[in-house]
Amino acid sequence: MSDWEPKIVTFLCNWCSYGGADLAGVSRLQYPSNIRIIRVPCTGRVNPKFILAALRNGADGVWVSGCHPGDCHYIEGNYYARRKFTLLKNFLEHTGIEPGRLHFSWISSAEASKFAATAREVAAAVTALGPARHFIKTEAEVA
Amino acid sequence: MHTYIEAIRKAARRLLTEKRVDAVIGFRKGTIPFMNEPVLVKHPDQVDQLTWDSHCGINLANYLGQRPGKVAVVAKGCDSRNIVVHLLENQIQRDQIYILGAPCKGMLDRRRLTAECRGREPHSVEEFDGRIRIKGRDLELDLERRAFLQDNCAICIHRNPVIHDELVGEPVAEQTGVDRYEDVRRVEQMTSEERWQYFDDLIAPCLRCYACRNVCPVCYCPTCFVDESKPQWVGKSVDPTDTRTFHLLRAYHVAGRCTDCGSCERACPVGIKVRQFTKKLERDILDLYGYEAGLIADQRPPLDTYRPGDPEGFIK
């Protein structure tokens, strides 16, 4: 498993963090290619089911990023998301998911360097934990 | 208990005779001891079916959602809190329900009582002054009531109905000094691997019958996530990953709405302590947002509101 690389499903809000990722690319900042970006309208759109679905489908980590509190394009979407994620993260960790698998951040569209730095941090944390086997079925599915 | 039964029947008869309600939802004797069943009484002649004792653990708020017309319902502390949740979520309007509040001293855990019978069949069960007397063939037991409360009733701090139109008995003293989250803290002492194993063992017998969902008053979605197929959030098999996903999402969906009435545990045919999942969320919501479900009728549920200064220590 020495050449194992984690897959990190990354939900970025269209208005801030996706712009931040774009700017990071345009600015030629280096960040790990482990992240798989899914663009969502707002972090408030991210349902806890999505996060479980990512883990069930083979993601080793999940990272959700959106606008800073107060800067949401939809005024308050990220405030609701913050409550949802706080509970979800505590809950999943309580039931046995390692703390380093779920990551949340606020990154504006101007914070390209923060995006690259956070991507490195998230990738390092998930790499350190190794592959996530929690939600992977061990035997073949029967029809 | 006898005074409760009289009061419930009297109120039900009055309400039905005066045609103030279309039906009364209460309990009647089950076909076996320790198991009372919900009953919908629609005619004054039938009110003598209604009963009350310590085996009325099912949450009657489950039968209220989207019901047309006006009904009366017998409500313990937890039922009344679930009625408040229904009102908040517009499942029913306040003027459609007449609440017969039943101050509750806790319901009994039928599993532990059955275990105490050690395979002998109980025929009757009676209660006097904090003692339970179970009789049957070759069986005569005299047990202390307190020791056989349901887990959630033993730590309940809202025994009296929070809303009611009339009470069927005197309010009871609330429990004080109970440790509500001892089991949550016990799990918190474990490492991630131990926790995963703990919950794996907990849900290992799960049949995925969804009794916990069906009996839950706040699980009323027309299409539950387990029945959705495009996308399919959770597999239909009893594979541990599917079972785990079901339990996690079920618990998450009742976050901030669960009143810890214990119906899910009571209904589970294999005795899984499913409250172990919901209690963590319940405690977090209390700690982080200072909210307890179903206590105040004009306060939005915690996941439907926010405060600018909510805790966010883990967010980068």
Image (cartoon, rainbow, N blue to C red):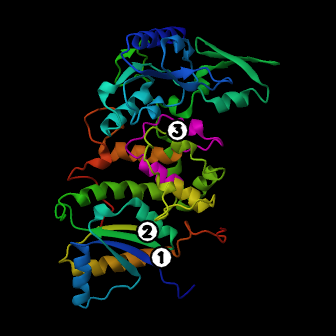
Q: CA distance from mark 3 to mark 2?
A: 36 Å
Q: Is residue B252 located in the magenta-colored stretch of the structure?
A: yes
Residue with the most extreme right position:
B138
In the image, the segment drawn in magenta is: B247-275
Which residue position is annotated with label 1? A128
What amino acid type is highlighted by mark number 2? Answer: Gly
Q: Residue at x 81, y 18 (%)?
A: B137
Numbered disc in front, either 3 or 1: 3
Mark 1 residue element? helix
Residue with the most extreme bottom position:
A28
Q: CA distance from mark 3 to mark 1?
A: 42 Å
Mark 2 residue element? helix
Which residue position is annotated with label 2? A100
Question: Do tags 1 and 2 sit on the same chain?
Answer: yes
Q: Is B162 positioned to the left or the right of B247 in the image?
A: left
- Label annotation for residue B215: 3
Q: From what the image shows, is residue B276 above or below residue B27? A: below
Percent coordinates x, y for residue B167 in the rendering: 39, 14
What amino acid type is highlighted by mark number 3? Answer: Val
In the foreground, B298 or B49: B49
The chain carrying label 2 is A
